[in-house]
Image (tube, rainbow, N blue to C red):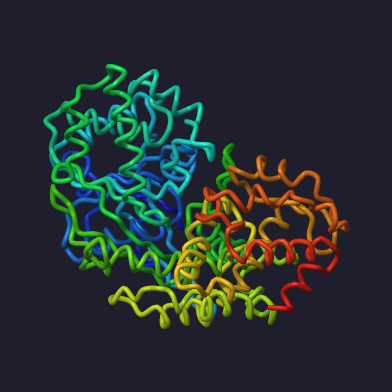
Amino acid sequence: MAIVLTNEGLKAKQLWEERRVKLPGYDRAQMVEKTLRAPIWVHFGAGNIFRGFIAGLQQRLLDAGLADRGIIAAETFDEEIIDRIYRPFDSLTLMVSLKPDGGTDREVIASLAAGWKASPAFAEDWGKLEAAFASPTLQMASFTITEKGYALRDMRGELFPVVAQDLAEGPAHARHAMSIVTALMLRRFAAGAAPMALVSMDNCSHNGEKLRGAVTEIAAAWVKNGFAGQDFLTWIEDETKVSFPWSMIDKITPRPADAILRQLTEEGFADMAPVQTAKHTYIAPFVNAEIPQYLVVEDRFPNGRPALEKAGVYMTDRDTVNKTERMKVTTCLNPLHTALAVCGCLLGYTLIADEMKDPDLKRLVERIGYQEGLPVVTNPGILNPESFLREVLEQRLPNPFMPDTPQRIACDTSQKVPIRFGETIKSRMADGSADMLEGIPLAIAAWLRYLLAVDDAGEPMAVSPDPMAEELQKALSGVRFGDPDSVGDALKPILANDRIFAVNLLETPLAEKIEANFREMLVKGGVRSALKKV
């Protein structure tokens, strides 16, 4: 008998239990009814990190009787997810946690009360979202929309065309994620201006600041253009009324693995196959992810909040969040991921765990972590940086059952470089030790070399999506594989761009190292040769 991931399918409890799947320990129908009648939490970004981590936090609280309502998922980017992954499965998720020994833990995450398309273009869903935001019971809206979801401007500082259109046409025609959120906040203001928190849970530095900056810029423009009154902007800028807590999140949730799909299908789970949407989202009814997870949140919620600390979240102050985020994003995980991603693509790897068996790559990330980053990172107090880094290098990245790929991690690298490498560079410049950096300049050179779309064997190679890829590839168009002399001055304007690197690298001792590495990598086997010198 097939096991079906729906409300009706969950009634066959024995089948689920025979497959070692933990089921929700609460009345889901009652939870859904209460949530839709008096919502407390809306989350923007309906993808895997949300389904596989954040939704599980509320599941813990529901199971323990510490909450009686769930979360409403809202999708601003790829509405096809709602039609193909949420609605056919009653907003349920099969969570598969991957152990380093090859075993799995399985659980049905049922804390999502609904999944809605967050756009005025979808009138029925939009009306429901507006009603949720008008409700005084709503305590928070959280976000996992990726760092680029907050950006209103390109690297030249000019508004993206869609944002300019939103500002001119007003909230009724909002298209960009930040315009959509601001439009919903305007609806909340008009319904009585009840307070709430807007909480970015994206993996980027000062995420609450990015969210606040985008929302207030759009609000100010709508006031200027006559779509809202000055009192709306005053309200949204008052953090006793609308707060923008900072957070640090950490859990690796790779794309659905073929091995997990085969396992589930063989055991009788129905309709588990992933789908690929028109916007190239690859997503399945199940989520596979590592077991370690961390969420640190600034505790500023003017309308109350769920008891997240009882689900394992560190609720703390902004300074501690900042230090913890800085520890992870600039030193203990993210820089290592990016270095492995670009080098792995160039060397033909398709699995991060396999890269950690490569002595040259392992040595590179150990150097970037232990020698280059760790001495200048601040200890946040709640987590020990060296212990965190050791867990990453010895347990998490080498986990052979984590199907995470360098190609996935290489996406949007231009948006990640200023934080993942730029902050350590700035710290080293401040203390006069920038000249000791070797791993970071090699990783930067490897990224620029990667943009040529030619691997280390001289064969054509696909480049992962990146908002700056076209612009950077144009700047490097005169560089030819096999001809190091063709570099000329092509790197200089890129290295001077502090929007990319957070510093002007031409003013550091690193520019020369980056160019030397880049030139070496332009011949067959050059990437491997450069790695061996670190």
Q: In this orientation, which residue lies closer to the viewer: 76 or 123?
A: 76
Q: Residue at x 70, y 52 (%)?
A: 491
How many numbered marks does the figure carry?
0
Q: Give the side of residue 142 with respect to residue 260, left or right.
A: left
Q: Position of residue 353 (x, y in %)?
A: 61, 73
- Quick check: can you spot residue 154? yes
Q: Residue at x 42, y 44 (%)?
A: 86
Q: Position of residue 68 (x, y in %)?
A: 17, 54
Q: Give the side of residue 393 with respect to residue 346, left or right.
A: left
From the viewer's perspective, is residue 384 above or below residue 83?
below
Q: Give the side of residue 279 with respect to residue 108, left or right.
A: right
Q: Position of residue 379 (x, y in %)?
A: 34, 76
Quadrant location of residue 296?
bottom left
From the viewer's perspective, is residue 19 above or below residue 77?
below
Q: Position of residue 101 (x, y in %)?
A: 53, 82
Quarter of the figure that contains the C terminus:
bottom right
Q: In this orientation, which residue lies closer to the viewer: 61 or 309?
A: 309
Q: In this orientation, which residue lies closer to the viewer: 232 or 344?
A: 232
From the viewer's perspective, is residue 351 above or below residue 130?
below
Q: Residue at x 22, y 31 (%)?
A: 233
- Quick check: can you spot residue 96? no
